[in-house]
Image (cartoon, rainbow, N blue to C red):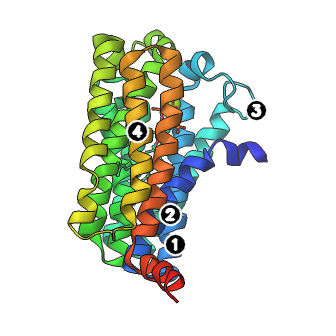
Amino acid sequence: MKVYMEILRPVNAIMAVVSVLLVALIGWEFDLRVLVACFVVFIATGAGNVINDYFDYEIDAINRPQRPIPSGRIRRGVAGAYGIGLFILASALGFYLGPLPGFIVVGSSLLMIYYAHTLKRKCFIGNLVVSFLTGLSFVFGGLIVGETVKAAYIGFYAFLMTMAREIIKDMEDIEGDKMEGATTLPIKYGHRIASIIAATFMLIASLTSPILYTINIFSILYIPILSIAIIVFLKAAFKILKDPRKETAGEVSKQIKIGMGITFIAFALGSRTITRIILGIIFT
Ligand SMILES: CC(C)=CCC/C(C)=C/CC/C(C)=C/CC/C(C)=C/COC[C@H](O)COP(=O)(O)O
Ligand SMILES: CC(C)=CCC/C(C)=C/CC/C(C)=C/CC/C(C)=C/COP(=O)(O)OP(=O)(O)O
Ligand SMILES: [Mg+2]
């Protein structure tokens, strides 16, 4: 039974849920619709991961043999049916939230299937799709709580940083991807160029991210925690530039995920109501 949870990649799915919760924190709205939206994003992201593993079983046998399908802990056909079932459930719940959320869930689900089947193997476009979907989870939350514009700004930063991480993951996965005839960025242009492009995304996102304070989305409390995340991202960028090997790519991909986690804390503490609560505690 554990394998049914493992194949959803719950850490990723929970991170996607956190993106909805963070937007709910900004709008300070917590009701049944937010709960359903969190559940929808969890299931949709999980289903995307399951379908991804369904199509990637040959690549994963080389790149990630410990995963549920290549390790033989779940049959490929069962995983496929499980993924489709979850997409249908997420879409039905999406329409419970309204026509637009419903169509977004259906569109995202189809895009995740198309990504896993075809786009993943194409240079850059596959990275764009995953990064777009990651940014979209903030916008989805924004639609539910009526904070679409603020959510779109934050989603844009999630998009930039995910672009960096996806390119770095392609550097890590180069062997299996080559066997499958994929034409990812590092396969087509080499590790050096891929590392420069990934680092550029990281640098642009990190160095411009204080804008979210200057345009009043977050309070000043956002800045000190964000600074820690920026240090993590900058260290990751310079590490991959200095040593663009597969092994380093694996380490840098993990570092970026840690940086993303720290950014989540910056977003939460920088949201107006949480800031007010914290300052209230400090000054009373
Ligand atoms: C500087 C600044 C403000 C950066 C923003 C960074 C930020 C907030 C990123 C958000 C990332 C986010 C919402 C992640 C959710 C988790 C997720 C769906 C990630 C996409 O992952 C796809 C990936 O290929 C799965 O790989 P793996 O993690 O190796 O299993
Ligand atoms: C807004 C709604 C309803 C959903 C958004 C759902 C989200 C957040 C999607 C983010 C992207 C994501 C995690 C998609 C899942 C499948 C996927 C693309 C996994 C990455 O696969 P590979 O590129 O094969 O990398 P691996 O080597 O880790 O398998
Ligand atoms: Mg995969």
Disc 4 or disc 2, which is closer to the eye?
4
Give the mark, 2 or 3, whose residue is nearer the N terminus.
Answer: 2
- Real-space CA distance between mark 3 and mark 4, rounded to the nearest whole angstrom: 35 Å
Instruction: Note whether ligand 2 is within 8 Å of mark 2.
Output: yes
Instruction: Note whether ligand 1 is within 8 Å of mark 4.
Output: yes
Mark 3, residue position: 73
Mark 4, residue position: 233
The image shows residue 150, relative to residue 74, as above or below, that is: below
Residue at position x 52%, y 54% from top? Answer: 15
Instruction: Note whether ligand 2 is within 8 Å of mark 3.
Output: no
Give the mark, 3 or 4, whose residue is nearer the N terminus.
Answer: 3
- Real-space CA distance between mark 4 and mark 2, rounded to the nearest whole angstrom: 30 Å
Mark 2, residue position: 40
Give the mark, 4 or 2, whose residue is nearer the N terminus.
Answer: 2
Question: Residue flagged by tag 4: what amino acid is it?
Answer: Phe
Question: Residue flagged by tag 3: what amino acid is it?
Answer: Arg
Front in this rendered view, residue 251 or 170: 251
Mark 1, residue position: 36
Question: Residue flagged by tag 2: what amino acid is it?
Answer: Val
